[in-house]
Image (cartoon, grey):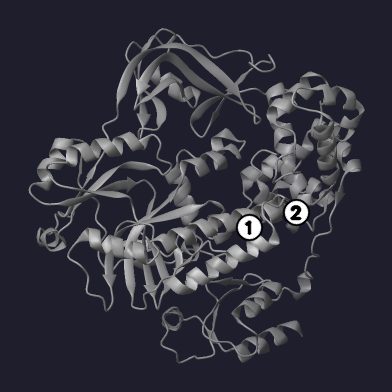
Amino acid sequence: MEKQERIKELVIKLNEAARAYYQEDREVMSNLEYDALYDELAALEKETGIVLAGSPTVQVGYEVLSELEKVPHDSPMLSLDKTKSPEALQDWLGDQKGMLSWKMDGLTVVLTYKNGALDRAVTRGNGTIGEVITNNARVFKNLPSRIPFDGELVLRGEAVIKYSDFRKINESIENVDAKYKNPRNLCSGSVRQLNNEITARRNVFFFAFSLVSAQGKELSNSVKENMNWLASLGFEIVPYKMVDRSNIIDAIAAFAEKVVENDFPSDGLVLIYDDIAYGTALGTTAKFPRNSIAFKWADEEAETVLTGIEWSPSRTGLINPIALFDSVELEGTTVSRASLHNLSIMDALELGIGDHIKVYKANMIIPQVSENLTRSGSWQVPKHCPACGGETEVRMENDVKSLYCPNPFCSAKKVKLFSHYVSRDAMNIDGLSEATLTKMIDQGFLSELYDLYTLSQYQEAIVEMEGFGEKSYNNLMKSIDKSRQTTLPRFIYSLGILNVGASNAKLLCKHFGYSLEALMKATVEEMTEIEGIGGVIATSVRDYFDNTHNQKVVDGLLPYLTFQEMPAEIDKGQQILTDKTFVITGSVEHFKNRKELKEKIESLGGKVTGSVTGKTDYLINNDNLSGSTKNKKAKELGIPILTEEEFLNMINEGKR
């Protein structure tokens, strides 16, 4: 196990060094040290047979799928019966020994390994049919891509996203309505992505909680021993405690103490009999297995008094209500505020200052107002924005009533707008925190985005600012100068157009040939022709460029910027495979590898996916008589199967 821990340690260390060097332009270790650690990692991987998916020794290819294939599970995945009573859990265990572990709050995934490599990953789905997410599982942060076991291995576990990563991702989303509600929702969306590059960026972790089968290996009758065997293969297993009737109450209390500091989301515990034969003999009910049971935390509520409502404006103009109340102790921490989300929720609670309310922590983590005992209903919508003093506006969107500040020059919007413009994925200007930007806006140094490029006129005053000095000022100027060379997608994203993220900006720019003029003139109809751009995004872009003030900002920025040339668009006349979807299987002869064939198809406008579905137009396979799953599926659906030679003839005919 020491060698496994060293492998994990080296993967983290080397990836951090690579990230610092390639993405942040700084060195945290010498090349000599990096090479030595890399060689140590490679040697340990060879010795143990364990290679983690995130290892720098593994190059994971990113792939975009058209849809996720659905497959039936070999055996139904039942839900667990639940209790909130520790004593009920103690009675359920009886005189047996059991394993008590976290009930991770993510997405359940079934993994199949063959010949030491990940062969298939499937979500729980509805318990009977799941979705194939093998492509995404290969980029889970801690999942072994190779294990020292050659037989077929099937296991189950939970894919989760840490609270710390969840917060970072939400902080990067300016539109409050677009923020993720909880780590589970974010994880579900991340694991079921069609583009596994997005999954990789979301930092998904996998925790094994059940060994299903291991071909050719005599399994133990103990759940604990089988779990520890999985750990020896390189899998991270769900943390557990072995319990019996005498210590289970104390064990539950020990888990409860760790919930607050736990970085991985959980919504309770799972207890399973350690004796597998005993648990199996109990069978199942129509809904639940009888060998295991879930324990859900009984939410700790506290009664308090609402002392105020704070209104927090955002860059998008949305003003968020926050409940302020007399401090109470919940789950071991002091709580005095909780988000109320929107005006509809406030109406439903009939809130008023002085009301007696009940608050709790959802899953022992997130403060929420659960009930209003006095329901005075005396709260009032603020008529003025707390940031700029302008008149507010109530809007009803998707049956939800929210409060907005419509003033385009609101100071809250200014700080958030500048903060977004200088962020890493936008113009990447270091040295301008929100606190620094607020000072510069308050002192009149910054009013519009283009003022960033004339900040040098305030050199003396900036050097004297708290937290600054000559060195900080010089570094800031260098960073601003560096931002002058950028790409059009980065620039479009940096403007802070509502609903336009970095990926949408790339789609828009590419479609219009990386021409700012063409994009600024594009109609909503033209933009919605782009796959991935809907009416909401297109309308936001059109509204932005139709605004006179926004036109002034863009015109003011352009003299300071130079856009890097992007790859030229392929001649549309050569796009002979447009709207055609291909699947490639088997070995290739005319191309170096399947990747080169895939690139050829894409260069002619076609798409390549990983599985044969009703949307597939052609399957390329040199062995037409193969009994492979893809061949069988293609024949069932009447999809033509082409050899490479037939494919080459087809595209050559098409070019004539």
Give x and y (percent) for residue 150: 37, 78
- In the displayed structure, does residue 100 sit left or right of residue 569? left
Q: From the image, tell me which residue sits under label 1.
A: 531
Q: Where is the N terminus found, in terms of image quarters?
A: bottom left
Residue 49 visible in image? no
User: Is the residue marked by circle 1 packed among few (<14), some (14-19), or many (20+) residues within 10 Å?
Assistant: few
Image depth: mark 2 or mark 1 in front: 2
Name the residue at 83% across, 40% down.
480
Name the residue at 65% across, 85% down.
592
Decide which of 180, 153 is in the foreground and name it. 153
Q: Where is the C terminus found, in terms of image quarters?
A: bottom right
Residue 476 visible in image? yes
Badge 1 amino acid: Glu
Q: From the image, tell me which residue sits under label 2.
A: 509
Q: Is residue 400 above or below residue 292?
A: above
Under circle 1, the secondary element is: loop
Decide which of 280, 329 is in the foreground and name it. 329
Name the residue at 24% across, 62% down.
225
Cα distance in 3D space between marks 2 and 1: 13 Å
Badge 2 amino acid: Cys
Under circle 2, the secondary element is: helix
Decide which of 644, 579 is in the foreground and name it. 644
Decide which of 79, 103 is in the foreground and name it. 103
Give x and y (percent) for residue 409: 75, 24
The image quarter containing residue 275 is bottom left
Give x and y (percent) for residue 148: 39, 73
- In the displayed structure, does residue 413 sit left or right of residue 159? right
- In the displayed structure, does residue 593 sit left or right of residue 51? right
